[in-house]
Image (cartoon, grey):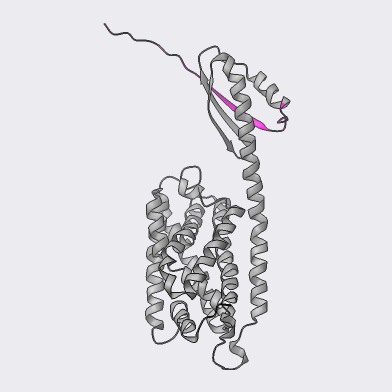
Amino acid sequence: MPRVSDTDIQRMRDQLFFEGQEQGRRISRFWVLLILAAVIASAGVVADSTATVIGAMIVAPLMTPILGMMLAIVLADRLNLLRSITYVVVGALVVIAIGFLVGLPIPVPVVAETDAQVAARVAPRLIDLVAALATGAVGAFALTRSDVSDTLPGVAIAISLVPPLAVVGLTLESGAPEQAAGAMLLFVTNVSAILASGVVVMAIYRVYEHLPAPGGESRYVNRKGAVVAVIVMIVVVMIPLAATSTRIGQAALDEIGVKSTADVWAAPADWTIVAVSTVGDKVEVRATGPLPQPDPATLRAALDARGMQDLTVDLELVPGNVVELPGS
């Protein structure tokens, strides 16, 4: 079985824990980078710039205390577990507040309907949990192996921490609390996944054998209880993730069914279905073509015949004529 040495443990502690002679520098570095990353992420979301948001992911230091929580759980280090939890919670609140402040002067609401960066982070699915579990495992593996530590920037990009929190603040300011809740769910999902897969990797490397120096029972945390808490977090987030996955999957099936039925309905009249999308609990269909327009009632009948009688469809008919303007 793979093992880590005492030197490896000390290296990981130096990377993740806010302790020792360099404690002040680590704390100041964390807050400066976090605030700047929050501003960059919020600006990137408002500008709908993927490159800017990725830059915020690389700068953001939130991965450090989250991995610190994981290491503290495995080492049963109560003091550093509490410290790391504090940095994660307070840091998350700071990012949300910065996102809210950045959104104040923006005249247009920053919501999923108007911004692709927001839309990508307000409806997390089970596949997001799977990706986060794998990313957390890579992060923990890179932490235990100094020879693969150069993969950590990739881990920072793959796991989304600060951008969802910025979206929480921006959508709260825009009056969209449901979208803010979805973005917060994505953040909690990623944190839970990092802790769960990270603890497993640390167990494989038998990090638990390296307990802190004796200092009284009060400095040790109930490791089994902490692991159970992480498992409960995973189970809890899986419930809304599964519900969202089911809803999105059903919406996709509805759109496919409506599109194929509408294509058949529109073809005899030389009309074209140009867009089919789900908005709320409705499917919106946009069609265009020459006059006379096809009868909407026949489309409704065709949908009912395919078992979609309970599905509400909004049909937008846009007549179009082509007029030739010959030159002289």
Q: Residue at x 41, y 83 (%)?
A: 23
Q: Is residue 52 above or below residue 316?
A: below
Residue 90 position, x and y percent, is 50, 70
313 is within the stretch colored magenta: yes
Residue 272 position, x and y percent, is 53, 22
State which quarter of the image contains the N terminus: bottom right
State which quarter of the image contains the C terminus: top left
**On the rendered structure, is 217 left or right of 114?**
right
Which residue is situated farthest in the front direction here?
A: 1
Instruction: Specify the quadrant of the image occupied by residue 317.
Output: top right
State whether residue 105 appears in this view.
no
Q: Residue at x 63, y 70 (%)?
A: 230
Q: Nearer the viewer, residue 129 or 162?
A: 129
Which residue is situated farthest in the bottom direction here?
A: 215
Which residue is situated farthest in the left direction here?
A: 328
Q: Residue at x 61, y 34 (%)?
A: 255
Q: Is residue 114 above or below residue 98?
A: above
**On the rendered structure, is 95 left or right of 257?**
left
Residue 191 position, x and y percent, is 55, 65
Q: Nearer the viewer, residue 70 or 107?
A: 70
17 is within the stretch colored magenta: no
State whether residue 220 appears in this view.
yes
Instruction: Specify the quadrant of the image occupied by residue 219.
Output: bottom right
Residue 149 position, x and y percent, is 43, 71
The range drawn in magenta is 306-328
Instruction: Specify the quadrant of the image occupied by residue 153.
Output: bottom left
